[in-house]
Amino acid sequence: MTSTSVEAQRLSDLARLRRVRDRIDREYAQPLNVEALARAVHMSAGHLSRQFRLAYGESPYSYLMTRRIERAMALLRRGDLSVTEVCFQVGCASLGTFSTRFTELVGVPPSVYREQATGAVAGMPPCVAKQVTRPVRNQEAPGAGPHLA
């Protein structure tokens, strides 16, 4: 392969990875799995997982769970839904898995977060509240930010 064709393949892979990430952002509440995501962009599941991790610093599944937990945090802050209702609304099928992942990412169980956060962002513009409360996976990992170059 020439350097031009290698570069073209890399750019093609990055475009496909963006499509996967955008689909996860849009359809986080739907049942999604790596095999289906990979099939949609004509990649193997293993290749998608490796390339996604290289580009975004986490696996497609971790990215999906981060989006789900981020949305769950917003719903729990509203205070009008139970933890179980929030779990199913964001696309999780297991309350146990949801609670475990939520606690890992946020640092407190969803029920505690709901009690503490209800009204915590009152009066704050939604765009600011989203940024301030966004969960950050792998904070302690060196260079955990996206590295697309």
Image (tube, grey):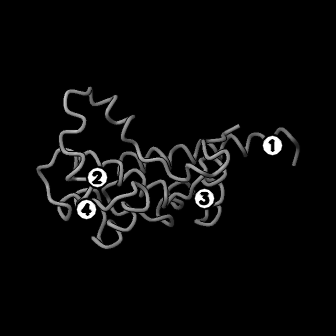
Q: Which residue is mark 4?
A: 87
Query: In the image, what residue occupies the spot 34% across and 36% down?
Result: 130
Question: What residue type is disc 3 on?
Answer: Leu
Q: Which residue is mark 3?
A: 48
Other residues around mark 1 within 10 Å, as few (<14) / some (14–19) / many (≥20):
few
Q: Position of residue 90 (x, y in %)?
A: 28, 56
Q: Report the Cα–Cα distance between label 3 and label 2.
A: 26 Å
Which part of the image, by quadrant, shows the C terminus? Answer: top right
Ranked by sequence position, the earlier of labels 3 and 2 is 3
Tell whether 132 sits left or right of 41. Answer: left
The secondary structure type at the circle numbered 1 is helix
The secondary structure type at the circle numbered 2 is helix
Q: Closer to the observer: label 3 or label 1?
A: 3
Query: In the image, what residue occupies the spot 18% across and 39% down?
Result: 119
Question: What residue type is disc 4 on?
Answer: Cys
Q: Position of residue 129 (x, y in %)?
A: 31, 33
Q: Which residue is mark 2?
A: 72
Ranked by sequence position, the earlier of labels 1 and 4 is 1
Ranked by sequence position, the earlier of labels 3 and 4 is 3
| Vertical position of residue 91 compared to residue 25: above or below | below
Q: Report the Cα–Cα distance between label 1 and label 2.
A: 43 Å
Q: Closer to the observer: label 3 or label 4?
A: 4
Q: Which residue is mark 1?
A: 5
Query: In the image, what residue occupies the spot 55% across and 53% down?
Result: 138
Question: What residue type is disc 2 on?
Answer: Ala
